């Protein structure tokens, strides 16, 4: 069915209607194969929308959806592209994504909407004639101050237009031009039949069976591409567990409630007598219930002892979008647990999840099991839209080869955004490396990489120069004038971007943090097979040297407060300057900001920030950060300015450890001990030190019974004292 149809100049409306009818016939042929297609409609925006409207009106489409600016929409109701995620789990036979107006193209919307198109459906991308030659209005989302979005590069759009133009799977429908249809391959073979009437594929049925029969200390990991029925499998399993139970509770978590709406929908379809208790909880008359908790709430309740323990079960959906450190905590808390994740997509990377989390599973639950859903449900094998979207958005970017150097580590190279955009193979490998190393990578991150203002890229290559082994992405921040810095610190202005500098100004009151020049680490990734070789450290040190030569005053980073990460940055000379006071909803972790001074101006700013952080940390730990992990608290104490123990403090510590003084009345002295010990090599006393810090600063009891808690505290104090050789003459007791 390939070829062209030329316009009749005497009847443009009839011509458009005929071509729309032709596209309807094309959709029917796709339906016969269980496939979907992409239509690229380009031209003057007003005429392009009229063509799209003709297609909209040419058939009785199932749940058609128009996405774009409401004021420019050709239909009465349209969805802004920023709300595309709200359609996850829905199915549409026709989706028109209007990128020709004031919204431009939202890459995340494109990725999300593609997954909602049902078999026999069309995704229509509407673009202006010159699309790909310059930035579109959606670039305003990441045009950091003072860059106007119109002045940014457009490498991302240029690449996308080039790939669409070269693809043999795209329907091209230019305004006033010829409609070009791709030649469709033969119909794929029918999928294997499934005996389970609730399931649509054999591998989905296998996953449901494994979820229902989840065993103690044998975690289950379910991975799948989009459209394989992963969330539906969770829903079917939950429905059966609820029906078979007599008063049990199952907990469900995901980065956000919208990610599991399809799970609840499937449960509702299979349990007619279901009772709803709001959007996040359902129950049956037998007393069984399914409850959703966001990651931050779930973690907090685990730490309080309200959740977890014998007999409890947790199901985690979109696990790739949740840090491995948090998953490890849940793994330890729940004897029965399952993790489901998408292999690649707009929520995160399952490949990265597998690589990061596999070691944790091997250590904590060596009998864990993995299942992969391979058969598509919403469409058939060989679907043209799926493969096209993957190429456009690099959702399945390959992990590069790991080729260790035989000699010393090579020097890094700096690659411009234009150079990277011109090297497709290297771009795919580099993005694949970034995806597997970060818990959440979205399609818009690729655009930021190629066109983000103030973005720099440094990498280390394999010995043959072909494959990235480690990559560092940084952004320039700060350099504000004094008047603007004052307005930001007072909360009167909020220029776009400059995450670290603005946060320190707004929350710490530091005007100087905005007037100074910063370089912030946006991403750093090392090939999983080449970790612990010093590649990341060398990348950072070489970039810090370069930043110093360029007159940058401060080098910084922000990340989830996790002990191993904090230890890495502390080893490089970075000091903490700010802690977030609430958990990130998606990660369950507190954000920490660290900085390193590069010149006298930077040292002056850092000294002020460090002093403010040291002054506020004790009260934050006592109240807002009382749930911060003890391992992190111990590392933060080590970053505080040294304060040698005074005579009175030493006496109070001695009286608590070796006499009968009430520890609560000597808390300041025990805090001082925890601070002093944080700078000492503690060896086997490291855990004791963490327990001491948690009690002294966060009032975390070391045992339930009061007498036991006091005795335990005396024991850990003695261990810390011995490790520090604080009272070397004190006899063993």
Image: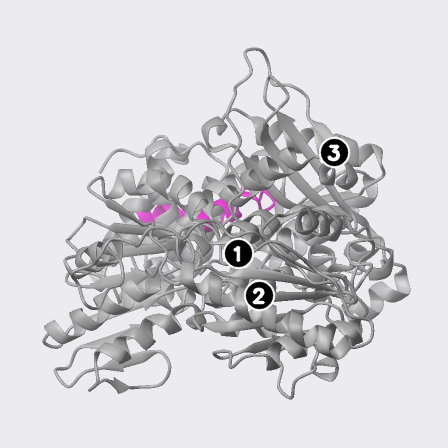
The residue positioned 72% from the left and 34% from the top of the image is: 544
Residue 50, compared with residue 323, is above or below; it is: below
Mark 1 = which residue?
Answer: 385
Residue 124, compared with residue 277, is above or below; it is: above
Q: Are marks 2 and 1 in contact (CB under 8 Å)?
A: yes
C-alpha distance separating marks 2 and 1: 8 Å
The total number of labels drawn is: 3
For discs 1 and 3, the disc positioned in front in the rendered view: 1
Count neighbours of disc 3 (C-alpha within 10 A) and say few if under 14, some if 14 to 19, many if 20 or more. few
For discs 3 and 2, the disc positioned in front in the rendered view: 2
Q: Which span is picked out in magenta?
A: 632-658
Seen from the viewer's position, the closer of residues 649 and 507 is 507
Q: In what element is the residue under mark 2?
A: strand
Residue 550 at least partly seen? yes
Residue 602, position as x, y percentages in the image: 78, 44
The residue positioned 50% from the left and 37% from the top of the image is: 679
Q: Is residue 520 magenta?
A: no
Seen from the viewer's position, the closer of residues 638 and 41 is 41
Residue 415 bears which disc, if any? 3
C-alpha distance separating marks 1 and 3: 32 Å
Q: Is residue 636 magenta?
A: yes
Count neighbours of disc 1 (C-alpha within 10 A) and say few if under 14, some if 14 to 19, many if 20 or more. many
Mark 2 = which residue?
Answer: 123
């Amino acid at each position: 069915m390939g070829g062209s149809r030329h316009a009749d100049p005497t009847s443009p409306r009839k011509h458009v209607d005929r071509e729309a009818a032709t596209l309807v016939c094309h959709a029917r042929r796709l339906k016969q194969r269980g496939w979907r297609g992409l239509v690229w409609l380009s031209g003057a925006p007003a005429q392009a929308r009229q063509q799209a409207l003709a297609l909209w009106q040419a058939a009785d489409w199932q749940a058609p959806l128009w996405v774009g600016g409401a004021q420019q929409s050709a239909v009465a109701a349209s969805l802004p592209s920023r709300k595309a995620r709200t359609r996850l789990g829905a199915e549409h036979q026709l989706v028109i994504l209007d990128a020709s107006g004031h919204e431009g193209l939202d890459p995340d919307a494109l990725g999300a909407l593609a997954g909602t198109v049902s078999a026999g459906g069309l995704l229509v991308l509407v673009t202006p004639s010159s699309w790909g030659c310059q930035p579109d209005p959606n670039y305003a989302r990441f045009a950091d101050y003072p860059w106007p979005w119109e002045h940014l590069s457009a490498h991302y759009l240029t690449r996308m237009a080039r790939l669409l133009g070269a693809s043999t799977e795209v329907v091209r429908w230019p305004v006033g031009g010829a409609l070009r249809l791709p030649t469709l391959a033969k119909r794929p073979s029918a999928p294997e039949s499934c005996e389970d009437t609730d399931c649509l594929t054999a591998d989905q049925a296998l996953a449901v069976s494994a979820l229902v029969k989840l065993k103690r200390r044998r975690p289950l990991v379910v991975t799948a591409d989009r459209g394989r029925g992963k969330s539906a499998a969770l829903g079917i399993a939950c429905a059966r567990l609820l029906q078979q139970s007599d008063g049990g509770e199952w907990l469900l978590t995901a980065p956000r409630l919208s990610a599991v709406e399809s799970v609840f929908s499937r449960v509702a379809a299979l349990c007619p007598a279901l009772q709803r208790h709001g959007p996040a909880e359902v129950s049956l008359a037998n007393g069984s219930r399914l409850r959703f908790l966001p990651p931050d709430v779930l973690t907090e309740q685990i730490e309080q002892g309200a959740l977890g323990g014998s007999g409890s079960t947790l199901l985690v959906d979109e696990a790739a979008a949740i840090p491995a450190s948090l998953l490890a905590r849940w793994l330890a808390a729940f004897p029965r647990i399952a993790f489901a994740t998408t292999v690649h997509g707009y929520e995160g990377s399952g490949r990265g999840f597998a690589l990061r989390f596999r070691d944790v599973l091997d250590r904590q639950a060596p009998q864990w099991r993995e299942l992969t859903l391979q058969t598509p449900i919403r469409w058939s094998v060989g679907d043209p839209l799926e493969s096209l979207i993957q190429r456009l958005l690099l959702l399945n970017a390959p992990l590069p080869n790991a080729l260790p150097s035989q000699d010393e580590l090579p020097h890094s190279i700096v690659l411009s955004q234009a150079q990277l955009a011109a090297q497709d193979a290297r771009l795919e490998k580099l993005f694949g490396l970034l995806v597997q190393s970060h818990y959440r990578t979205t399609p818009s991150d690729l655009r930021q990489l190629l066109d983000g203002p103030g973005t720099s890229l440094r990498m280390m290559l394999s010995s043959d120069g072909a494959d990235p082994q480690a990559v560092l992405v940084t952004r320039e921040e700060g350099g504000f004038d004094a008047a603007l810095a004052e307005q930001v610190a007072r909360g009167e202005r909020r220029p776009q971007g400059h995450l670290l500098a603005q946060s320190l100004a707004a929350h710490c009151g530091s005007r100087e943090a905005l007037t100074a020049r910063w370089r912030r680490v946006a991403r750093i990734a090392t090939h999983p097979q080449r970790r612990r070789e010093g590649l990341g450290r060398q990348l950072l040190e070489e970039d810090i040297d370069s930043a110093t030569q360029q007159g940058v005053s401060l080098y910084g980073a922000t990340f989830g407060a996790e002990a191993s990460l904090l230890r890495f940055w502390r080893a490089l000379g970075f000091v903490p300057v700010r802690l977030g006071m609430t958990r990130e909803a998606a990660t369950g972790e507190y954000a920490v900001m660290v900085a390193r001074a590069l010149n006298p101006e930077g040292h002056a700013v850092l000294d002020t920030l460090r002093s403010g952080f040291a002054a506020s940390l004790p009260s934050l730990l006592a109240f807002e950060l009382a749930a911060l992990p003890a391992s992190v608290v111990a590392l933060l104490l080590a970053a505080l300015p040294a304060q040698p123990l005074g005579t009175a403090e030493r006496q109070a510590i001695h009286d608590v450890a070796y006499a009968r003084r009430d520890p609560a009345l000597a808390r300041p002295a025990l805090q001082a001990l925890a601070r002093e010990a944080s700078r000492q090599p503690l060896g086997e006393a490291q855990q004791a030190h963490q327990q001491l810090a948690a009690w002294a600063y966060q009032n975390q009891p070391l045992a339930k019974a009061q007498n036991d808690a006091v005795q335990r505290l005396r024991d850990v104090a003695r261990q810390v004292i011995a490790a520090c050789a604080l009272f070397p003459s004190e006899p063993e007791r």
